[in-house]
Amino acid sequence: MTEFKGTALTPELYAYVLAHNPPLDPVQRGLVETTQRALPAHAVKQIAEEQVPLLAFLVRLTGARHVVEVGTFTGLSALAMAQALPEGGGLVALDISEEWTAYARQAWEQAGVDGRIDLRIAPALDSLRAMPAEPHIDLAFLDADKDNYVNYWEELVPRLRPGGLIVADNTLMMGSVLDPENHPAGAHVREFNTHVAADKRMESVMLTVADGLTLARRVG
Ligand SMILES: C[S@@+](CC[C@H](N)C(=O)[O-])C[C@H]1O[C@@H](n2cnc3c(N)ncnc32)[C@H](O)[C@@H]1O
């Protein structure tokens, strides 16, 4: 077996990592707190804190102007990415929940990025299929229902510009990818990971960030 050269995270080490990342701004921090207070049973859906500066970093690194998000919840990931867009850039946010995205709308307005975000409330697969078929997306963040991950991928890849990036969250699914018989979500993500690794149109790497984060770039 290949030797593991990673560093196991302790709570102290995790706090150290966060302390050396750009801090959340007041609107981002407020959204984390509001989500935990108002939706305690669902707050785990929100991206991990270290992913906030990472998503912004990826938007800036790629120079993305047209971003699509599949799975918005209370809007933290969309907020981070929209804040990092250049002048004239835009983000299309897809979700099915009016209730959860109401918190998102508030935070986006507070941060002054609501004008850059087009929130579409409908099953994300329908919203993706309604988008232009030609390559026009620079960066897509995938963070919705796991049973549709492969379907989302298949809608996104042809719409990605050459060099465009897909960032897929939860690709370790809390380790359940290794126990698919007992975890339906783990089975779906396992199928997705196999699909991604075999896709010759994309170059992909799976990272052990938070619950697993796969970065995939369109090469063909
Ligand atoms: C893990 S949360 C997204 C977290 C979000 N990215 C954030 O930063 O807080 C998943 C979201 O996917 C949405 N969702 C689930 N099934 C969906 C579907 N079929 N179409 C669109 N959105 C869906 C849920 O309503 C939920 O808000």
Image: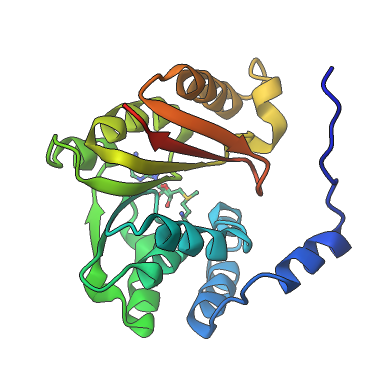
Classify the position of the C terminus by image quarter. Answer: top left
Front one among 159 and 126: 159
Colour option used = rainbow
- Residue 108 occupies quadrant: bottom left
Q: Is residue 94 above or below residue 12?
A: above
Does the rendering let one see residue 74?
no
Percent across and percent down for residue 33 are 59, 75
Tell me: 177 left or right of 108: right
| Point 56% across, 29% down: residue | 185
Percent across and percent down for residue 163 are 34, 40
| Point 41% across, 41% down: residue | 166
Q: How many marks?
A: 0
Q: Is residue 90 above or below residue 213?
A: below
| Point 34% across, 33% down: residue | 152
Classify the position of the N terminus by image quarter. Answer: top right
Q: Is residue 112 above or below residue 76?
A: below
Percent across and percent down for residue 117 are 26, 66
Front one among 207 and 68: 207
Percent across and percent down for residue 18 are 72, 68
Tell me: 212 left or right of 75: right
